[in-house]
Image (cartoon, coloured by chain):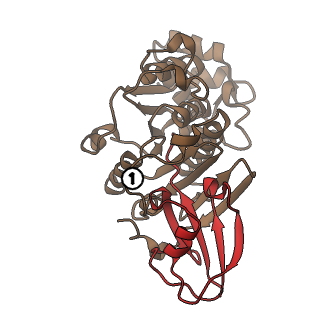
Chain colours: A red, B brown
C-alpha cells in the first residue's frame, strides 16, 4: 500500500521531507518509525491524516503520516 | 488629572504630543510618565513615539495596549526580543520572570545580553532596557523560577502570558496554570533553524498536544543550539499574537501550529483538530 510520510525539522536530515512509499498491508506507524531509525524519545507529535495518532495504529492505503521532533528551546 | 488632560489637549498638534512635552507635563503635574501617557491617550492624543503605529493601531487601541498587562516567562532568547517589542509597542505593564543571570553563551542571540551585563540578572537587564527605551512602560522584574504554586501571584491581573521558556516540563506546567487561571498563552519554541508558535486559550489544551509524545529531556535545540535569527523571528510572531489578543482583533494561531523551517524556508500551518483537545492530558 502507498503511505505518504512527512518529516519535519531535523527528522529530514539524511532522510527526506516528504515521500510516498510502499509498505505491506497492516503496517503500523511504529514500524515506519523504526525503519527510518528515528528514536522514539525524539518524537513530540505524530499525526495521521491530520489527527493525533498513536504509534501502534495500523495504516491503510493512501494514509499520510507526519512526524514532528521535540522543539523546546527559548 | 482632568487638568493634566486639558493641558495636553492644548499642547497637542495634529493629535500628537512630543516626548519633551510629556516630560514637561510630568514635572508640572508632579506625576509619572505613565500617567501622562494614559491622560493623553484618554483624550485621544497619541504620544509622538507611537505615531508610526498609527494606521495599524488607532489611539483608542493604543490606550487598550497601555492598559494591558503581559507576563513574559523566560527572559532569554525569545523573552528578550518579546520584552523589547512589547515595550516599544506600548504595552503598559510587562511582568518579566526569570531566575537566571547572563552567561557568555547567551551573547550570540539574547537581545538583552552584552559583555557588560555578564553575571547580571536577566530581569534586571530587562528593567534597565525598558526604562531606557520606553519609560512610560512599567516592567515588573520577578527574579524567580516559574512555579505553578506561584502562578496566581505572578499572573494577577495579567491579560496574556508569553511562553518563552526552555524546558518542556515547565512549559507544560505553565500551560496548565494558564488553563486553570483562564489566561490566554502564546507559546513559542525554537531549536536551530526551526521554531513553532501556538496560541492557547483556556480549554484548548493545545500545548499538551504539541508535546503529546514527550517523555523527558530537551528537544533538538540541545544538539543544534540557537542562532540569532530564530528567536528574533519567533518572538516577533508571539508579540503580534499578544497584540491581537489585547486588541481583540485579527485571527490568532488558535488550534493551529505555525511550524517554521528556516533551513528550507518553509512556513507551514499544522491544524490541531479541536476534537483532539484531550490528547496529551
Give the vertical position of B150 relative to B266 (above or below): above
Image coords of residue B161 (percent x, y) = 44, 45
Q: Quadrant of residue B58?
A: top right
Judge from the rendering whether residue B276 lies leftward or rightward of residue B147; answer left or right.
right
- Judge whether residue B250 can be spotted in this image: no
| Residue occupying image coordinates x 67% and y 42% | B57
- Judge whether residue B257 can be spotted in this image: yes
Q: Quadrant of residue B226?
A: top right
Give the vertical position of B139 relative to B154 (above or below): above
Tell which of B246 and A70 is nearer to you: A70
> Crowding near pointer 1: few (<14 within 10 Å), some, many (20+)?
many
Name the residue furthest left: B149
Image coords of residue B139 (percent x, y) = 45, 26
Give the vertical position of B35 relative to B224 (above or below): above
Give the vertical position of B49 relative to B174 (above or below): above
Report helix, strand or loop for mark 1.
helix
Image coords of residue B37 (percent x, y) = 55, 26
The residue marked by circle 1 belongs to what chain?
Answer: B
Tell which of A50 and B69 is nearer to you: A50
Image coords of residue B94 (percent x, y) = 46, 33
Residue at the spot of label 1: B175
Q: How many marks overall? A: 1
Judge from the rendering whether residue B14 lies leftward or rightward of residue A27; answer left or right.
right
| Residue occupying image coordinates x 46% and y 32% | B93
Amino acid at each position: 500500500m502507498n503511505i505518504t510520510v512527512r518529516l519535519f525539522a531535523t527528522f529530514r536530515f539524511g532522510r527526506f521531507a516528504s515521500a510516498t512509499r510502499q509498505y505491506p498491508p497492516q503496517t503500523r506507524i511504529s514500524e515506519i518509525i523504526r525503519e527510518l531509525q528515528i528514536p522514539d524519545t525524539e518524537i513530540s507529535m505524530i499525526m495521521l491524516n491530520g489527527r493525533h495518532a498513536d504509534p501502534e495504529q495500523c495504516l491503510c492505503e493512501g494514509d499520510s503520516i507526519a512526524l514532528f521532533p521535540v522543539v523546546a528551546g527559548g | 488629572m482632568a487638568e493634566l488632560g486639558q493641558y495636553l489637549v492644548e499642547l497637542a498638534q495634529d493629535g500628537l504630543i512630543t516626548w519633551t512635552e510629556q516630560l514637561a507635563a510630568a514635572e508640572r503635574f508632579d506625576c509619572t510618565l505613565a500617567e501622562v501617557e494614559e491622560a493623553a491617550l484618554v483624550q485621544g492624543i497619541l504620544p509622538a513615539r507611537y505615531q508610526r503605529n498609527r494606521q495599524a493601531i488607532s489611539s483608542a487601541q493604543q490606550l487598550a495596549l497601555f492598559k494591558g498587562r503581559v507576563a513574559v516567562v523566560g527572559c532569554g532568547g525569545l523573552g528578550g526580543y518579546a520584552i523589547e517589542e512589547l515595550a516599544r509597542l506600548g504595552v503598559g505593564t510587562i511582568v518579566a520572570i526569570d531566575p537566571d543571570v547572563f552567561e557568555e553563551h547567551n551573547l550570540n542571540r539574547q537581545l538583552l545580553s552584552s559583555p557588560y551585563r555578564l553575571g547580571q540578572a536577566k530581569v534586571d537587564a530587562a528593567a534597565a532596557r525598558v526604562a531606557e527605551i520606553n519609560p512610560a512602560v512599567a516592567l515588573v522584574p520577578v527574579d524567580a523560577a516559574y512555579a505553578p504554586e506561584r502562578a496566581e501571584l505572578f499572573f494577577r491581573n495579567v491579560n496574556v502570558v508569553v511562553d518563552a521558556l526552555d524546558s518542556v516540563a515547565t512549559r507544560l506546567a505553565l500551560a496548565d496554570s494558564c488553563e486553570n487561571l483562564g489566561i490566554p498563552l502564546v507559546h513559542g519554541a525554537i531549536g536551530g533553524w526551526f521554531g513553532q508558535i501556538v496560541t492557547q486559550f483556556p480549554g484548548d489544551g493545545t500545548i499538551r498536544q504539541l508535546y503529546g509524545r514527550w517523555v523527558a529531556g530537551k528537544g533538538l535545540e540541545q544538539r543544534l543550539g540557537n542562532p540569532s535569527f530564530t528567536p528574533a523571528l519567533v518572538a516577533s510572531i508571539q508579540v503580534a499574537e499578544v497584540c491581537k489578543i489585547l486588541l481583540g482583533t485579527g485571527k490568532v494561531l488558535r488550534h493551529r501550529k505555525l511550524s517554521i523551517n528556516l533551513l528550507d524556508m518553509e512556513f507551514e500551518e499544522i491544524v490541531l483538530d479541536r476534537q483532539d483537545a484531550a490528547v496529551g492530558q
